[in-house]
Image: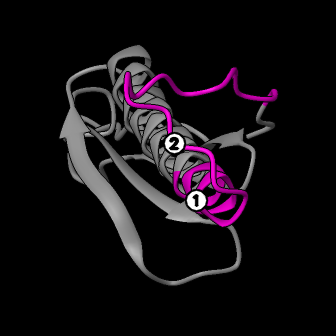
Amino acid sequence: MSIPIWTVVVEIPPCYVIRQSVMADIVADRVNPAETFHYVVQRRGDSDILGWGQETTMAAAIDTSEMIMRELGGRRLNEAVALYDAVMRRLDRAAGFSDQRGIVPALPPVRL
């Protein structure tokens, strides 16, 4: 008499996290689907990988990918601030204005 062997296949659907022009694709591991979750962060429509890794839970993979996306957004904001500062200083010099204290005028809102 033979004993039937049952195989349980666990299929966890992929998860996508989108923040502005950056997205994260999170998938369960094929060998250990309930133990390992892989994430890849990319700009939408671009094949360059901005960040990737793996976590032990789907929630941790989502959190880590969101952290990477926030850091990318913060870097973009810092670049916008630096650009604005450079433009304002150039305009000030062209107008003959020199602020010896190095005070930067208030920044307009930047949409990320």
In the rendered picture of this protein, how many numbered marks are placed on residues? 2
Neighbor class of circle 2 (other Cα within 10 Å; few <14, some 14-19, many 20+) is few
Tag 2 secondary structure: loop
- Reply yes or no: does residue 26 show up in magenta: no
Q: Is residue 44 left or right of residue 55?
A: right
**Camera-side residue: 64 or 85?**
85
The residue that appears at 37% across and 71% down in the rendered structure is: 49
Assign the N terminus to one quadrant of the image: top left
Specify which label sits upstream in the sequence, 1 or 2. Answer: 1
Residue identifier under label 2: 98
Tag 1 secondary structure: helix
Assign the C terminus to one quadrant of the image: top right
- Reply yes or no: does residue 94 show up in magenta: yes
Q: Is residue 98 left or right of residue 29?
A: right
Asked if one can make out residue 14 in the rendered structure from this viewpoint, the answer is: no
Above or below, comparing residue 100 to residue 94 in the picture: above
Residue identifier under label 1: 93
**Camera-side residue: 70 or 18?**
70
Does the residue at mark 1 contact the one at mark 2 (Cβ under 8 Å)?
A: yes
- The picture places residue 22, in percent across and down from the top left corner, at 62, 53
Q: Is residue 107 left or right of residue 8?
A: right
The residue that appears at 51% across and 42% down in the rendered structure is: 98
- Boundaries of the magenta span: 86-109
- The picture places residue 85, in percent across and down from the top left corner, at 55, 46
Kind of residue at disc 1: Arg
- Please tell me whether the stretch drawn in magenta is mainly helix, strand or loop: loop
